[in-house]
Image: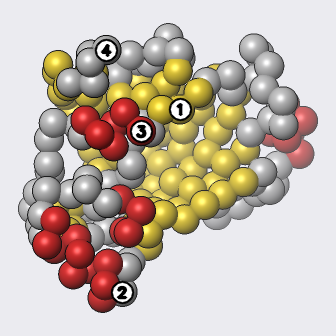
Amino acid sequence: MIDRFLHSEPTSLGRIDQPTSGYTVRLNELRGMFADQGAWERMVSDDDPIIYEVALVEPKEPGDSDLSYGVTVLHAGNVGGEFFFTRGHLHVPATRPELYYALSGAGVILLADVGPDGVVRATDQVRLSPGWVGCVEGRWAHRTVNTGDTDLVFFYVWPSNTGHDYETMARSGFGRHLKR
Ligand SMILES: [Fe+2]
């Protein structure tokens, strides 16, 4: 992984040189997550917009000393007034943290403390603006929300030997719906 940092060429803001993987998430993949189901269905059948794009750098075989990193471009928009967001996940195990660095745009990291029964026990949120750096403790489920009018672009780093649980949060939600 160090080699990759050393050999990486400078690129434009929010663009990773030589990502090992990447993906795009459209609105249809966020079924059941927005509060206004009718608005979600209308937008999906209309043009099913791209909500966010991810570029990642991860080792092929993660070891205990490896770090992975990525950049997400979360587009601006809303579903029935609710701002676009990332799917959100839990880290497995819950001791693995993640460092975030906001590059451009305006937004929020939504945090949720989820019990073993899958019920949200507490929520919190942190405002993101360009230059903001902070660490999310592993015990908090996290989702990013674009509350601005332009792309929200952020960089993040996590221990490579971290699992990601998206299913629990798809069921439980984050306990908050941020609207215009
Ligand atoms: Fe994470």
Residue designated by label 3: 167
Residue designated by label 4: 116
Considering every residue shown, the one lying at the far bottom of the view is 46
Q: Secondary structure at mark 2?
A: loop
Q: Nearer the viewer, residue 73 or 161?
A: 161
Residue designated by label 1: 164
Residue designated by label 2: 47
User: Residue 113's image quarter?
Assistant: top left
Residue type indicated by callout 4: Pro
Placement of 108 over or under 2, stated as above or below: below
Q: Is residue 99 left or right of residue 112?
A: right
Label 1 CB-ligand 1 distance < 8 A: yes
Placement of 55 over or under 51, stated as above or below: above
Considering every residue shown, the one lying at the far front of the view is 117
Tell me the CA gap for discs 2 and 4. Answer: 38 Å
Any part of residue 126 in sight: no
Q: Nearer the viewer, residue 157 or 40?
A: 40
Q: Nearer the viewer, mark 3 or mark 1?
A: 3
